[in-house]
Image: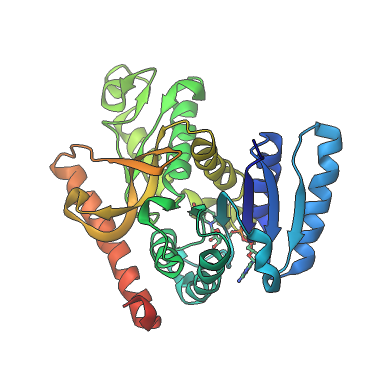
Amino acid sequence: MARAKIALIGSGQIGGTLALLAGLKELGDIVMTDIIEGVAKGKALDLAQTAAVEGYNAKLSGAGPENYAAIAGADVCIVTAGVPRKPGMSRDDLLGINLKVMEQVGAAIKQHAPNAFVICITNPLDAMVWALRKFTGLPANKVVGMAGVLDSARFSCFLAEAAGVSIEDVRALTLGGHGDDMVPLVRYSTIGGVPLPDCVKLGFFSQEQLDAMIKRTRGGGGEIVALLGTGSAFYAPAASAISMAESYLRDKKRMLPCAAHLDGEYGIKDTYVGVSAIIGAGGIEKIVELALDENEKAMFDKSVASVQSLIDACKKISPALA
Ligand code: A3D
């Protein structure tokens, strides 16, 4: 059977890490593209040489945006093209510039890789994946956004540290939009199978500490932006997207929180927002609608409203989306 082809559209900080992880996991051959051709070609060459040391079998090549044809026939496209935020910026400040990038990238995917499973990472995530899907014209089950795996990973990291428990045994779940009003779900997050409210009762950490970890998760991206001084997080975002690509390519049917297209789930239509979904060879094979209590539903609805206002802004900027 031929090797899978993975197209990375955007070869910056996340794109380079995606290529390294995809190579190490031998997910397939990798084509890197970027508006700065030398960046894609240079990183691809560097990573092709890394294969000699690490011993992974993957062909790596790079191309510029005038040669988007290089993504032809890709099984998976991972989109990071655009700009990241700088300290003091919100993800929403990126909307105007990144929407134009989504239009260009969407047209390229539509023309060259219409059968791909597309994972969008570009911010503001939920609105960008919604627009990208429109620009590609692909079925909704083949276009997904990465955010929930990352937000949940951040929450897991803080929980493991506070509880003094191996991160292997922490399973956190964060739904909603990828903004400061995302929804970490304590009832659906567990340590060694124990839901977080019971972990508080067991004395793993106090309610105040748990509340502080929820707040830190919501601001998790901004914390790293402020520390880095330039650019935003890239290792964990790349690892998160690779877990989604792997579930698709290996038909693992992992149930992961992702920005998926809602068509009536949670009473919401034609919006992308973070929900639990099963990813297998069929793309987004199922959206799992969780029973949210009143408080969780109110937080989720607030987050959805934020996403919706960004989608409305996209429609105003780009008449093709209206
Ligand atoms: P960066 O290192 O700047 O890489 C982006 C790359 O995109 C650059 O190399 C650009 O040259 C390239 N690019 C710009 N326009 C085009 C185009 N039209 N075609 C091809 N390439 C293009 O940024 P990064 O890798 O750190 O982040 C990429 C995106 O991911 C940003 O929008 C971030 O805000 C976003 N991000 C999202 C998350 C989520 O959890 C959703 C987390 C972290 C970053």
User: Where is residue 78 shown, x and y percent of the image?
Assistant: 56, 53
Q: Is residue 288 left or right of residue 114?
A: left
User: Where is residue 61 shown, x and y percent of the image?
Assistant: 76, 54
Q: Residue furthest front?
A: 1
Q: Is residue 142 left or right of residue 274?
A: right
**Colour setup of the view:** rainbow
Front one among 154 and 97: 97
Image quadrant holding the C terminus, namely bottom left
User: Where is residue 189 shown, x and y percent of the image?
Assistant: 33, 30
Image quadrant holding the N terminus, namely top right
Visible residue check, residue 268: yes
Which quarter of the figure has residue 43? Answer: bottom right
User: Where is residue 242 shown, x and y percent of the image?
Assistant: 57, 42
Q: Count the marks.
A: 0
Visible residue check, residue 182: no
Which quarter of the figure has residue 288? Answer: top left
Q: Residue furthest left?
A: 294
Q: Is residue 149 left or right of residue 263?
A: right
Vertical position of residue 165 compared to residue 116: above or below: above
Front one among 129 and 320: 320
Vertical position of residue 307 compared to residue 50: above or below: below
Q: Ligand 1 lies in which image quarter? A: bottom right
Q: Is residue 68 left or right of residue 211?
A: right
At 43% across and 52% down in the image, what residue appears? 142
At 44% across and 49% down in the image, what residue appears? 147
